[in-house]
Image: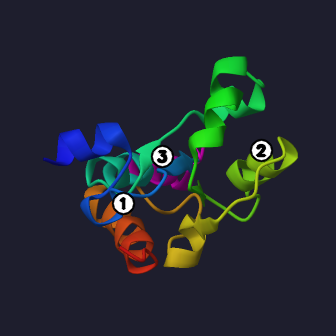
């Protein structure tokens, strides 16, 4: 069920809503990797649909056009630079929810991208989810 849910971008309790799109940082730092991997894990769990941040930055027509389907837009950043959030906002999109890995008790440059650290971010995102 999780694979079906993740591919549709809708969790079971939100199945009648427009999809929640997830944009994770994939920066060079360990916290960027954690943000990216947490976003992917959230998508697999049916929390939302992973979408292409690079496509937003590059203003790729297919990606930009498909943003109209978003019910919610989540930015998951690795550090206080907030590259994911800024990329979305500069492209004209309103970020519904913003989560920062470093606000989850992890320190940039000192937090390996392991399952424990990824799960901390996933748990925080899930705690902020209405469904």
The image quarter in which residue 56 lies: top right
Q: Position of residue 72 (x, y in %)?
A: 57, 58
Q: Residues within 10 Å of mark 1 (few under 14, many from 20)?
A: many
Q: Is residue 110 left or right of residue 43?
A: right
Labels 1 and 3 touching (C-beta < 8 A): no
Q: Position of residue 104 (x, y in %)?
A: 50, 76
Q: Is residue 15 left or right of residue 36?
A: left
Q: Which residues are magenta?
A: 25-37
Q: Residue at x 44, y 70 (%)?
A: 125
Q: Residue furthest top?
A: 61
Report helix, strand or loop for mark 1.
helix
The numbered dot on residue 118 is 1
Q: Position of residue 49 (x, y in %)?
A: 43, 45
Badge 2 is on which residue?
Answer: 87
Of marks 2 and 3, which one's residue comes earlier in the chain?
3
C-alpha span from label 2 to label 3? 15 Å
C-alpha span from label 1 to label 3? 9 Å
């Amino acid at each position: 069920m999780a694979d079906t849910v993740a591919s549709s971008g809708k969790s079971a309790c939100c199945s009648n809503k427009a999809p929640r799109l997830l944009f994770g940082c994939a920066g060079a730092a360990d916290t960027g990797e954690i943000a990216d991997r947490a976003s992917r894990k959230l998508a697999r769990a049916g929390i939302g649909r992973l979408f292409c941040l690079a496509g937003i930055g590059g203003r790729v027509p297919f990606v930009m056009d498909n943003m109209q389907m978003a019910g919610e837009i989540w930015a998951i950043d690795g550090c206080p630079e907030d590259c994911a959030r800024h990329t979305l906002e500069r492209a004209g999109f309103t970020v519904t929810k913003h989560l920062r890995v470093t606000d989850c008790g992890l320190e940039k440059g000192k937090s390996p991208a392991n399952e424990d650290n990824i799960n901390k971010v996933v748990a925080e995102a899930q705690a902020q989810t209405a469904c």
